[in-house]
Amino acid sequence: MNDERVERDDLTKPVTTERVRECDECAGAGDEMQTCSLCDGYGGIAVDDGEMMECPECEGSGEALAECAYCDGSGKVEDYA
Ligand SMILES: [Zn+2]
Ligand SMILES: [Zn+2]
């Protein structure tokens, strides 16, 4: 008897949780390009004999994909509005 009512409730409920919206900082991706922490954005790191080698972390680009600090990598932030 109550089956119909339960189904109707499910349909009217939004799929996503209320009060949560996409993170502005990473556009909901959860991660973003940040200055590489290993080479500090230089794209290379110094080896023992003073030569530079390509940074293995960012492959020389100086930037690496890192977890968004704003949403802790979830891609969503709580909407306080
Ligand atoms: Zn984010
Ligand atoms: Zn690097």
Image (tube, rainbow, N blue to C red):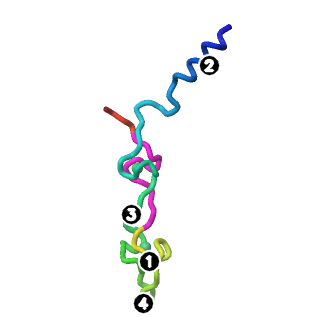
The residue pinned by badge 4 equals 51
Considering the image in quadrants, where does the N terminus appear? top right
Considering the image in quadrants, where does the C terminus appear? top left
Query: What is the spatial separation of the Cα atoms under label 3 and label 1, in whole angstroms?
Result: 13 Å
Query: What is the spatial separation of the Cα atoms under label 4 and label 1, in whole angstroms?
Result: 14 Å
The spot of residue 16 in percent (x, y) is 49, 33
Q: Earlier in the sequence, mark 4 or mark 3?
A: 3
Give the SS element for disc 2.
helix
User: Residue lying farthest left?
Assistant: 81
The residue pinned by badge 1 equals 60
Give the SS element for disc 3.
strand
Q: Earlier in the sequence, mark 1 or mark 2?
A: 2
The spot of residue 18 in percent (x, y) is 44, 30
Amino acid marked by disc 3: Gln
Ligand 2 picture quarter: bottom left
Label number found at residue 34: 3
Q: How busy is the neighbourhood of tag 1: few (under 14 within 10 Å), some, or many (20 plus)?
A: some
Q: Is mark 1 within 8 Å of ligand 2?
A: yes
Label number found at residue 7: 2
Q: Earlier in the sequence, mark 4 or mark 2?
A: 2
Q: Is residue 71 magenta?
A: yes
Give the SS element for disc 1.
loop
Name the residue: 44% across, 60% down: 66
The spot of residue 59 in percent (x, y) is 48, 75
Name the residue: 40% across, 77% down: 43
Residue range corresponding to the magenta coloring: 64-77
Q: Earlier in the sequence, mark 3 or mark 1?
A: 3
Q: Earlier in the sequence, mark 4 or mark 1?
A: 4
Q: Is residue 32 magenta?
A: no
